[in-house]
Image (spheres, helix red, strand yellow):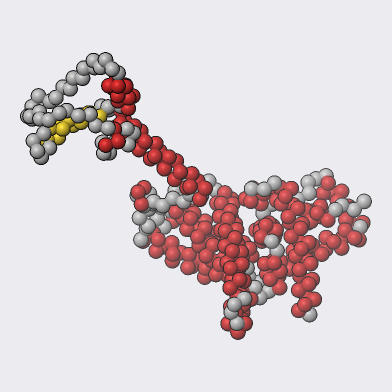
Amino acid sequence: MMRTVEAADDSFREVYETLYPLIFRIAFRITGSTPIAEDLCHEAFIKYFEKQRALPDMDQTKYWLIRVVKNLSFNLEKRKKRERSAYEKYSKQIPVSIRSGEEELLRAEARSAVQKCLNKLPLKLRTVLVLKEYSGLKYKEIARILGIREGNVKIRVFRARERLAVLLKEDAHVSG
Amino acid sequence: MCPDKETLSAYLDGEIELPWRERLGKHIKECPACQEYLDSLRQLSGRLRADPEPDAGPSLERLKHRLAARAAYPASGRPPIWRRRITLPLPLAAGVGLVILCLAVGLFAAALNLKSSVPRMSIKKLPYGATEVEVAAPIEDLEKLLKSLDQPAFTEEIIFTLPEDSRFIMAGEPRMLRAEDIPGSRSW
C-alpha cells in the first residue's frame, strides 16, 4: 500500500526538511539551472515518497537521494547531448535573429563565473567536485554513492580543481 | 622532496591518514611552493562555497504541494499485466520474432505431414448416378501399389471396407486415379 503524507508524516517530513536544501544545492550545482534542479529534486523525493520501505537512517537516505539525483542528471546530460547535436544541425538553417532569443535564455541561467565554469567541466569531474565541495562528504562516501573506487574520487577531485582553476583564469581574462 | 599536487588536494580535503598527515603538514610549513599551491586550492574552494545560489525554500514548498496532491489523489498503482508495456532492445526483439516465426513454420509443416501420412477414403455421388470412391494413402503405399499393378501376374486383392450406413449404388467401372489429379494433396 502506498504511504500517505499523514501515515509517514513525521519521518518523511524530517527527511525533506533535513535533506531538501542539500539535495537541491547539489542538483543546482550539477545542472547549473534552478528549474532543472527543482525538477530533478522533486522527482527524487517523489520516488522516495513512493518507496515501499523507508531507508534505515538519515545517512542512507541522503546517499540514496544523491544517487537518484546524480542518475537523473546523467540521463538529462545524455538527452541534452542528443538534442544539442540535432539543434546544431537544425540551427544552421535558421536566421541568427531568431536564434539569439534562445541563446539569451540559456545564458541567463549561469550568471556567476563560478557556475559558468563549473558547467564547462565534464559531468564526471563536475559531479565529484560538487559532492566534495557542496555536500561535505568524505571520499569514501562519494565513492560509495557513485560506485567508483576511492582512489578514483581523489584523482577526479584533483583534476576537476585543476581544470576549474584554468577555466576561471580564462574567464577572468576574457571578462576583464 | 615535494608531494605531488594530487596529494596536496587530498590533504586539503583532510583525506590523508596519520602519520602521513603530520609529516606532510611539517613539509608544507617549510615549503613555499607547496604552501602557494595549497593556498590556491583553498582560494578556489572558498570561491566555490561563496558563490551565491538559489534559495531552496520555495522549491520545497512546491514539492510539499505536489506531495499533498499525490496523497489526496494517489495514482492507481501499476496497470494490470496485460496493459503493461515492456521495452526490448531491437536485436532481442528481432530474435524473439525469428524464433516465433520458426516455430510457426515448424508446426505448419508438422501438421501437413500428419495430414498426408493418414490414409483416408471418400465416397462421392456423381450427378449421372455413378459413385466415385477415392482412396488416399501414403506415397510409399501408392508406389508399391502401382508397381504391383504393372506386374504381369497381377493377383493383388484390395478390400475397401465401406461404412455400413452409406447407401449407394455401384455403377460403371471402378477406376484408379492418378495422384496428380487429386486436389489438395501436395505430397502425392
Q: Position of residue B88 (x, y in %)?
A: 48, 49
**Residue drawn where x is 46% and y is 51% of the image:** B87
- Tally the numbered discs: 0
Q: Is residue B2 visible?
A: yes
**Residue drawn where x is 9% and y is 24% of the image:** B164
Q: Is residue B78 left or right of residue A148?
A: left
Q: Position of residue B45 (x, y in %)?
A: 74, 64
**Residue drawn where x is 61% and y is 71% of the image:** A89
**Residue drawn where x is 48% and y is 44% of the image:** B95
Q: Quadrant of residue B144?
A: top left
Q: Position of residue A64 (x, y in %)?
A: 56, 51
Return the residue found at the far bottom: A97
Q: Is residue B184 left or right of residue A76?
A: left
**Is A47 situated above or below A112?**
above
**Is A83 situated above or below B136?**
below
**Is B10 situated above or below B60?**
above
Q: Quadrant of residue B140?
A: top left
Q: Position of residue A9 (x, y in %)?
A: 44, 56
Q: Quarter of the image for the C terminus of chain B: give it.
A: top left
Which of the two residues, A43 or B112, is positioned nearer the viewer here?
B112
Q: Is residue B20 left or right of residue A110?
A: right
Which of the two residues, A128 or B104, is positioned nearer the viewer here?
B104
Q: Is residue A58 visible?
A: no
**Is A28 situated above or below B162?**
below
Return the residue found at the far front: B152
